[in-house]
């Protein structure tokens, strides 16, 4: 029976591809996705970018710090701040549930002499 090296060659090729990392197309797609998320929110006045998860309070802080002249209308910088109230408290996430552990019962401590005397009483007896 003849054996071939085709299977070995295919396994080696696959191993080398995994070690080489992602292909150029995969890297380009990943880079485009990252840029999209990185530049998700952009100030219309100074063109500074903010990440996707930037909260309105952070965006409002930017308006106050960088564009003091338009504090009354922050939607000129970020349209998503239309109707934003800086004095309103931010919604708070639900507090984590604390699970109370049951206390272990304390084991009654006996004197050492009591233990020795109990052990000596049972030494001479054998079970049948």
Image (spheres, rainbow, N blue to C red):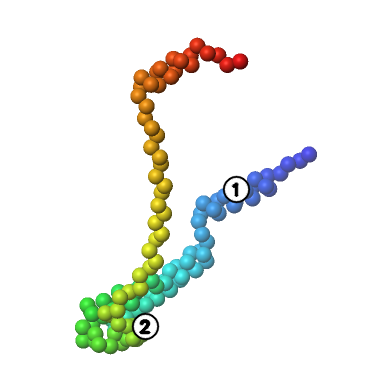
Residue marked by disc 2: 80
**Residue 9 versus residue 68: which sits nearer the camera?**
68
Identify the mark nearer the N-term, 2 or 1: 1
Q: For mark 2, give the secondary structure.
A: helix
Q: Which mark is residue 112?
A: none
State which quarter of the image contains the N terminus: top right
State the residue at coordinates (23%, 80%): 64
**Residue 102 versus residue 121: which sits nearer the camera?**
121
Height in image: 70 above or below 105? below
Q: Position of residue 32 (x, y in %)?
A: 45, 71
Q: Which mark is residue 12?
A: 1
Q: Quadrant of residue 115?
A: top left
Relative to 31, 58 lies left or right: left
Height in image: 116 above or below 100? above
Q: Position of residue 106 (x, y in %)?
A: 38, 37
The answer for how far apart the CA atoms under marks 2 and 1 are is 53 Å
Residue 90 in sight from this viewpoint? yes
Residue 48 in sight from this viewpoint? no
Relative to 5, 126 lies left or right: left
State the residue at coordinates (38%, 71%): 53
State the residue at coordinates (48%, 16%): 122
Q: Quick check: marks 2 and 1 in contact, CB under 8 Å?
A: no
Q: For mark 1, give the secondary structure.
A: helix
State the residue at coordinates (37%, 83%): 80
Task: Work out which residue is located at the far top of the displayed protein and give it.
Answer: 124
**Residue 22 versus residue 6: which sits nearer the camera?**
22
Which of discs 2 and 1 lies nearer the camera? The answer is 2
Q: Position of residue 33 (x, y in %)?
A: 46, 70
């Amino acid at each position: 029976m003849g054996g071939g090296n085709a299977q070995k060659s295919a396994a080696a090729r696959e191993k080398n591809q995994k070690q080489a990392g992602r292909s150029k197309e995969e890297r380009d797609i990943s880079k485009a996705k990252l840029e999209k998320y990185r530049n998700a929110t952009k100030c219309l006045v100074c063109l500074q970018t903010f990440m996707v998860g930037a909260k309105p309070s952070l965006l409002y802080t930017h308006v106050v710090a960088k564009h003091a002249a338009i504090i009354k209308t922050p939607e000129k910088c970020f349209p998503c701040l239309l109707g934003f109230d800086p004095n309103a408290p931010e919604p708070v996430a639900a507090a984590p549930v604390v699970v109370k552990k049951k206390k272990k019962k304390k084991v009654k401590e006996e004197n050492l002499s009591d233990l020795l005397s109990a052990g000596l009483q049972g030494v001479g007896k054998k079970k049948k």
